[in-house]
Image (spheres, rainbow, N blue to C red):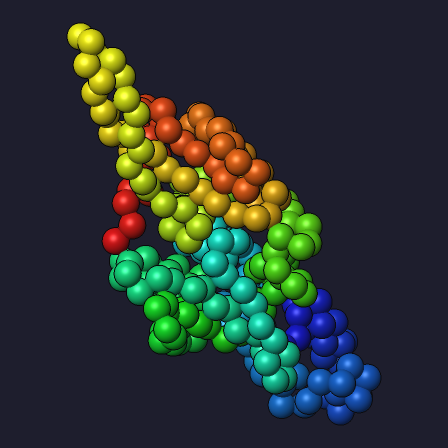
């Protein structure tokens, strides 16, 4: 897969009268590909073109959600011919989450099929593409918590526009809504009260910091009950987060 810079060099050479044979030898691009680039000039980009390689942004709302899912339970693995597999691991107990993961991947890369691969207790939502590393520059060797995780500027812009969908992806992957309880003495009697709260757990301090940042964008308070876990427990904060996350299903 050639980037837009290579295509621009080739088109300029063709426009200047250089032969396809000479350009092919110089750039290492087949003459059939050069003819296709020449004949398509001025038309819409290929459906399979990478948004980042063609100076476009991915579908922002779906990408914000997918980025959260990727940082939580996603990974990229390299296959033959520089093709990468994006895999999002989804618990079989939550079919809605699986459907939404498929929808997000499809919206970001609509020209290729999205597969559901069954494993023991979970389903992997899988899509193959050479350009997944362009959309997820956080990809690297080893677990995410063993390397630095930082968002590129264009990713931060998308998350800043849609922090709710980014948080939905994070909490759908590595989060949960639980019922906590506390006791209080009322009229001399000990009474038990239950209240919901959201928890997000991740061993990467960088991913936890991104979750904190997104919550801050929405004015949702949080606290850290332990090193690798974030809690949203205040009643108004739980209600606000529940507007776009809700219980898993």
Does 188 sit left or right of 126 as displayed? left
Which residue is more in the foreground, 228 or 42? 228
**Residue at 62% in and 52% down:** 145
**Split into 4 quadrants, where in the image is the N terminus?**
bottom right
Viewed as shown, does residue 199 lie left or right of 12?
left
> Looking at the image, which residue sits at the far top?
187
Q: Position of residue 104 (x, y in %)?
A: 39, 59
Give the vertical position of 31 relative to 62 (above or below). below
Image coords of residue 28 (percent x, y): 76, 85
Place of residue 110 in the rendered image (x, y in percent of width and height, measured from the top left): 41, 68
Along the horizontal axis of the image, is 51 left or right of 122?
Answer: right
Q: Name the spot of residue 218 as percent of width and height, x first.
A: 43, 30
Q: Kindly tell me whether residue 136 is visible in this rendering.
A: yes
Count of numbered marks: 0
Left or right placement of residue 93 versus residue 78 in this view: left
Q: Residue at x 17, y 8 (%)?
A: 187
């Amino acid at each position: 897969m050639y980037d837009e810079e290579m295509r621009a060099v080739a088109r300029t050479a063709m426009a200047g009268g250089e032969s396809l044979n000479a350009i092919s030898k110089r750039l290492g691009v087949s003459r059939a590909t050069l003819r296709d680039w020449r004949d398509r000039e001025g038309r819409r980009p290929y459906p399979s073109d990478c948004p980042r390689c063609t100076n476009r942004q991915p579908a922002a709302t779906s990408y914000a959600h997918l980025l959260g899912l990727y940082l939580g339970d996603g990974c990229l693995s390299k296959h033959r011919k520089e093709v990468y597999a994006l895999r999002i691991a989804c618990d079989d107990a939550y079919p809605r989450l699986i459907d939404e993961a498929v929808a997000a991947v499809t919206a970001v890369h609509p020209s290729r099929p999205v597969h559901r691969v069954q494993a023991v207790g979970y389903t992997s939502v899988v899509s193959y593409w050479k350009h997944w590393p362009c959309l997820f520059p956080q990809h690297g060797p080893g677990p995410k918590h063993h390397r630095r995780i930082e968002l590129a500027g264009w990713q931060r812009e998308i998350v800043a526009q849609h922090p709710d969908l980014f948080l939905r992806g994070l909490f759908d992957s590595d989060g949960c809504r639980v019922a906590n309880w506390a006791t209080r003495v009322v009229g001399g009697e000990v009474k038990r009260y239950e209240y919901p709260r959201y928890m997000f757990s991740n061993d990467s301090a960088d991913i936890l910091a991104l979750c904190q940042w997104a919550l801050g964008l929405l004015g949702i308070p949080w606290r850290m009950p332990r090193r690798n876990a974030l809690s949203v427990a205040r009643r108004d904060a739980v209600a606000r987060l529940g507007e776009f996350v809700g219980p898993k299903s």
